[in-house]
Image: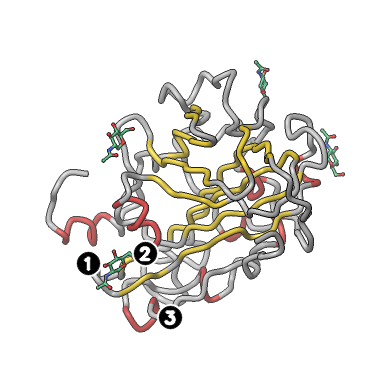
Amino acid sequence: MMMVPHSFFLLASWIPLALGHSMVYDIWANGRRYNGWNANGDLKAYPTDTPAWFTTNAGGGPLHPSDADQPQIICAKGGSNANMSAPVAAGADVRLRWWMVDQAWPVGHHGPILSYLASCNGPCASVNVTALKFVKLEERGWLNSSTYQEGYWASDEMIANNGTWTIRIPPKLAPGEYVLRHEIIALHVAFTSTGPYSLDGAEFYPQCVSLQVEGTGTKTITGGVDARTLYKGNEPGLTLNIHTSPEHMGYIIPGPPVWTGAD
Ligand SMILES: *[C@@H]1O[C@H](CO)[C@@H](O)[C@H](O)[C@H]1NC(C)=O
Ligand SMILES: *[C@@H]1O[C@H](CO)[C@@H](O)[C@H](O)[C@H]1NC(C)=O
Ligand SMILES: *[C@@H]1O[C@H](CO)[C@@H](O)[C@H](O)[C@H]1NC(C)=O
Ligand SMILES: *[C@@H]1O[C@H](CO)[C@@H](O)[C@H](O)[C@H]1NC(C)=O
C-alpha cells in the first residue's frame, strides 16, 4: 500500500469502493504453493490445478447479513468444488495470501478473520456444498486500540504479514478430505442506528479451499453446522460502529465457539 495520510483511510472507508477487495490468491500446504482461483488476475480462467473453490464473484465483492442464510454464504457466490484437494499433514499449517493483481486487502476494511472446517465424507471434488457441516477452527477479531481510530484488527495483522494468514490443522484430526472455509468480515460500514451506515452493512468475504489431511489422527469433526446457520446477521459482532472506540473495544467475534475436539 502507498503511504498516504491516515485521514485518507478514514475518508475512504466511508465511500463504497468500486475496486476489488483482493481474494485468496496463494495457498501454501506441505511446502507446496498453489494458485488461488484468480491466479492470473483476470477473474476468468480457472486454474486446473487449484484446491481453491471456483466462484463467480468477479471483483471479490462482499456478501451481507441478508445473505447469512443463503447458499452463497457457504463458499461464495457461485461457489463450486475445486477439482483437487491439497495434501497437508495434521498438525501442520496452511497459509493463505489475500491479494488481487496489484492490490492488497484495503486497510479501511477492518474486521475479524475466521476459519472453519468441514469433512467432505469422501472426495471434496464431488461433495454437495449444502451438505458440509462446519466447525470453527480459529478466529481473531479486534486486537487493541493502536494505529487506527477503528483500532487494530485481525485484518490489519494480515496486511502487516504481507497479506498472509496461517491456519493450524488440528494435530489429532483424522485423515480425509476437508473443506476449509476461510473468511474476512469487514465492519467499516456495519452500523446500528442513524448515519450513512446500514444495518446490512457488514461485509462477508468467504473463500473455500479443499484439503487432503494426512496422518494418523483419529478425531472426526463433531457438532458441525451448515454455514447458513453460522450467523443471524443482527448479532452485536456484525452491527457495531467500529469508528467509535467504546463500541469496538471488547468486540465479540460472531459465529460458534472454536472447536478444539482434535487438538
Ligand atoms: C474444475 O472444476 C470446475 C467446477 O468447479 C469445472 O467447471 C472444470 O471443468 C474443472 N476442471 C478440470 C480440469 O477438471
Ligand atoms: C445438493 O443438495 C441439495 C439439498 O439436499 C439439493 O437440493 C441439491 O439438488 C443437491 N445438488 C446436487 C448438485 O446434487
Ligand atoms: C496490537 O496488536 C498487534 C498485533 O497483535 C501488535 O503487533 C501490536 O504490538 C499491538 N499494539 C499494542 C499497542 O498493543
Ligand atoms: C510479499 O508477497 C509478494 C508476492 O508473493 C512477494 O513478492 C514478497 O517477497 C513478499 N514479501 C515478503 C516480505 O515476504
Mark 3 or 1, nearer chain start: 1
Q: Which residue is mark 2?
A: 153
Quick one: which residue is furthest to the front in this view? 216
Name the residue located 51 percent from the left edge and 49 percent from the top edge.
205
Query: x, y (%) of residue 241?
Result: 39, 73
Q: Which class describes the residues within 10 Å of circle 1: few (<14), some (14-19), or many (20+)?
A: few
Q: Amino acid at mark 2?
A: Trp
Q: Which class describes the residues within 10 Å of circle 3: few (<14), some (14-19), or many (20+)?
A: few
Image quadrant occupied by the C terminus: bottom right
Q: Which class describes the residues within 10 Å of circle 2: few (<14), some (14-19), or many (20+)?
A: many
Q: Which residue is mark 1?
A: 147
Q: Which residue is mark 3?
A: 250
Left or right of 7: which side holds 54? right
* Label 3 CB sits under 8 Å from any ligand 3 atom: no
* Label 2 CB sits under 8 Å from any ligand 3 atom: no
Quadrant of residue 220 within the rendered picture: bottom right
Quick one: which residue is furthest to the bottom in this view? 246
Name the residue located 37 percent from the left edge and 70 percent from the top edge.
143
Please state which of residues 11 and 24 is positioned toward the viewer in this rendering.
24
* Label 1 CB sits under 8 Å from any ligand 3 atom: yes
Mark 1 or 2, nearer chain start: 1
Query: x, y (%) of residue 253?
Result: 52, 70
Q: Is residue 201 above or below residue 75?
A: below
Q: Amino acid at mark 1?
A: Thr
As helix, strand or loop, the secondary structure at mark 1 comes to loop
Q: Amino acid at mark 3?
A: Gly
Left or right of 140: which side holds 219? right
